[in-house]
Image: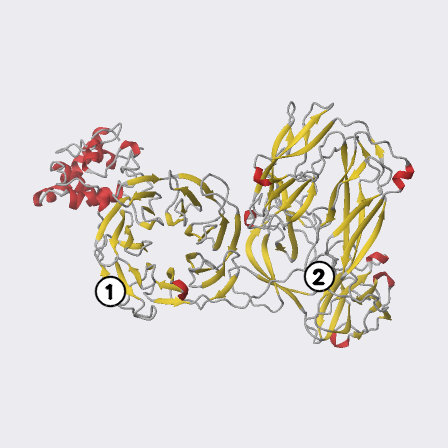
Amino acid sequence: MTMKTLLAMIAAAVAAACGPLLAAAAPSYDRDVVPILRTYCAGCHNDRDREGELSVERFATLRRGGAESGDPVKPGDAAASVMMRRIASTAGDHMPPDDEPQPSAAEVAVLAAWIAAGATGPEHDDSILRTLSVPKLPPHVGPKPVTAAAVSPDGARMAVARGRTVEIVDIVAAAGVGPAPPVLLALADLPGKVMAVHYSPDGRRLVVAGGVPGLVGTAQLRDAATGAVEREFGGHRDLLHDAELSPDGRLLATAGYDRSVKLWNVADGSLVRSIDVHNGAVFDLAWHPSGRLLASASADETVKLWRTSDGVRLDTLKEPQAEVFAVAFTPDGRHVLAAGRDKRIHLWRLESLDAPGANPALHARFAHESPVVAIGLSADGRHLLTAADDRSLKCWSLPGLVLEHEHARQPDLVAALVPRGAGGMVVGRMDGSLAVEAIAVDPPAAAIAAAPASGPPAAAATPAAPAAAVEQAEREPDDVAAAAQTLSLPAAVKGSIGRPGDVDCFRFAARAGERLVLEVNAARSKSKLDSRIEVLDAAGVAVEQVVLQATRDSWFTFRGKDSNQSDDFRLQNWREMELDEYLYAGGEVVKLWHYPRGPDSGFIVYPGEGGRHTFFGTTPVTHALGEPAWIVEPLPPGSRPAPNGLPVFRLTYENDDEPTRRFGTDSQLLFTPPADGEYVVRVSDVRGFGAAAGAAEFAYTLHVRPPAPSFAVSVGGKDPKVSPGSGREIVFTAERHEGFTGPIRIAVENLPAGFTFHGPLEIEAGQRKALGVLSAAADAPAPDAAASGAVKVTAVAVVDGREVAKEIGTLGELKLAEKPKVTVAILPGPDASAVRQVPGEPLTLLVRPGSTIAARVKAERHDFANRIEVGNADAGRNLPHGVYVDNIGLNGLLIVEGQTEREFFITASPVAKPGRRLFFLKAGPDGGQCSTPVMIEVLPPDTVAGK
């Protein structure tokens, strides 16, 4: 189509459409043209988003035109106007774009008639985005929805926002909120829907925030007694979701759907600064109690922390996985809380109010089955109420975020949760109702610890001299509970799975809490049986062992897992997970043991090497890529946990393979009877295999007896060759049996002259290894065979209240090696408060759970010029469980060529337990030269390092 033809078409259309319009009256800019510009043009061409440098927001900017086209309007000549040419064009310059709504023929005619009549402008050239034409609807019948609420600091009054009005009510005279508290004052002259209302700290003023969606956001400061407007704050181009006064009342923070956070000077109404870095609407603001920090919660799935003195962003909290609707600081100022569309409550510990830095995430509690829409902190800061889109309301402890009470389902969506002193929480709902919910705390349904992979809890008392097992032979038929063969405990039954699908049942009596071991010996005796054992009650019903409530959801990423792998557990949402938490997947339960160490790694699960151990009698299985997994909390059998939108798994007493892998495919189950009575143990082949009746190839021996907790310790690194003036690593590995989980002390005595073993050394409770350093003085003489043979290694532990000492032997043949090519040493970092140095004692580094300290490693290059590798995920030898060398990157802890020193960082996770422990570094070159150990002391969580 030629331009001549196009212009002819425009002229014909204008003549046909404008004739009747011009015969009546010329279109008005305000009445007729503005609605068209606002609907089809202003979204892209406004003062903020000037596509093509064109803004139609004001008449003057419209006539100024764009960078290339100039004035789009030629008064008196619609066909020659760029605006009309673009609307009529069928080429790439057509406006509005083809994928956007298009004006109707009648609307095009209005524009053409307005131009043809001279394109007269408005009397007052205001932004066309300050007004909005909306249809008139009949008034709402009944109470208007509560959109926001605030209680005065003295607890006597409450401001209740209901759409475009605010009511000041006397909640003291009403003896509570009640269905209709007395209204003292009603504010109806508000510039739009009210989304937030807050009292000033002294209670004398009221902040009201809201506006008109898509048009304008406004906050007003009003006299709380009279309702008179003292000051108004605009500057926002869309609805405000919040406006909050600083604790000293001098600053006002406003934010809303236009993604902007603005700080205003209350005294004169001037804009202090505008912060425009959020990529989504800002739904909530919170001031730190000190007034030095402001938090903003956004649809961009983040919470951002701002230093209010200069607007510098101190941190972006990225853990939320969807829009964040609410944010708050705890009253003590030590934690940040947030919640929103991802159905979780997030809690971070606040590390710094002044400098940019990371604030560690402590919890990401899956709280509701639908998005969390409101949160409220109790006046004492000890409890948190959360309301969700499904009308559920729950109370949580702070800072632990333990569910304390599930309130009755609310009659409608909760829009406001406001503390009322010690009188509970005021709840405002979308049906217009108000109520006070008491802070209710149910008796705790205590979580239970899993029986350790190696057995039941070590505290279980067992006879010092257990009775001899009564040996019996299996008697058929015994394939159902009713026909079970009766055993006298302790028992040893010799039986056989005589045909495919056969099962054998045995009945025994037990008392509540009297722990027992049920164990099958088959594969160890060369039987073909792959055993499975289950515990039933007297009626043949499986006995529940534990209830696992999922608290976070996840799935396997990057690759699946075989049934042996203990490392590289890559999981979605891994940042929400913590060490020592249980992970449930495909019927298997494992424990998270070590964090991912960089971008190309995953969790290591217990015990950190070899085949992974399982818990609650579950069996390791293969997991596929994308398979769902959950962090679970163990609860006592019979528990009925409050729904949170995630599954509940009920595990019965059963076992396929012994959880520590010591017995191959043989089964071992640790059973704690829930009540006095008779129980049945059922033995079968997990595959359903069997042989002809009486065939020995599927034979087994079943043991039912009390547990016998014990341990064994082996030594790795025997026959060490130690360089003079340096050290070598010695590894002590514990094997824990049938419930022993306590610490094990290691003593190395009678060393040759010039040799030192650095102690004390202990295998931590529940852990498997301790690493020590055997060093030789620079002038140490070479030991002979007699000196090596005199070395004595002992492991000592308390088992069932009795001290047990076990002789481990020697360290083998000790030899002096050549002089070291490189040695390393640990030095303190720059923070003196994290260091304690006492003459005659090892250097001590101080760290508290959830924090990071710096130290240095220094190398002496005696005859080595290449790079010195000092470990990757295993850097920091013998650190306490939950303490690790952090920020190692892809190359690990490394001293590059030409350098002799570097800084490194030690982080203590929140699960790290207070205590002292020696640790060291091991250099990769020259056979693994070890530094002299230094002490790391984990302080109690509330202790300040250096004090």
Most foreground residue, 814 or 389: 814
At 66% from the left and 56% from the top, the residue drawn is 588
Residue under label 1, please give it.
184
Horizontal side, residue 422 vs residue 769: left or right = left
Say which label, 2 or 1, has the lower sequence index.
1
Q: In which quarter of the image is residue 730?
A: top right
Residue 181: percent from the left, percent from the top?
A: 29, 68
Most foreground residue, 603 or 937: 937
Residue 512: percent from the left, percent from the top?
A: 70, 72
Q: Identity of the amino acid at label 1?
A: Leu
Residue 109: percent from the left, percent from the top?
A: 18, 42
Residue 671: percent from the left, percent from the top?
A: 72, 66
Most foreground residue, 240 or 330: 330
Q: Please, which residue is most extreme toward the left here?
A: 23
**Badge nearest the viewer, 2 or 1:** 1
Q: Quadrant of residue 157?
A: bottom left
SS of the residue under disc 1: strand
| Mark 2, other Cα within 10 Å: few <14 / some 14–19 / many ≥20 | some
Q: Identity of the amino acid at label 2?
A: Pro
Residue under label 2, please give it.
457
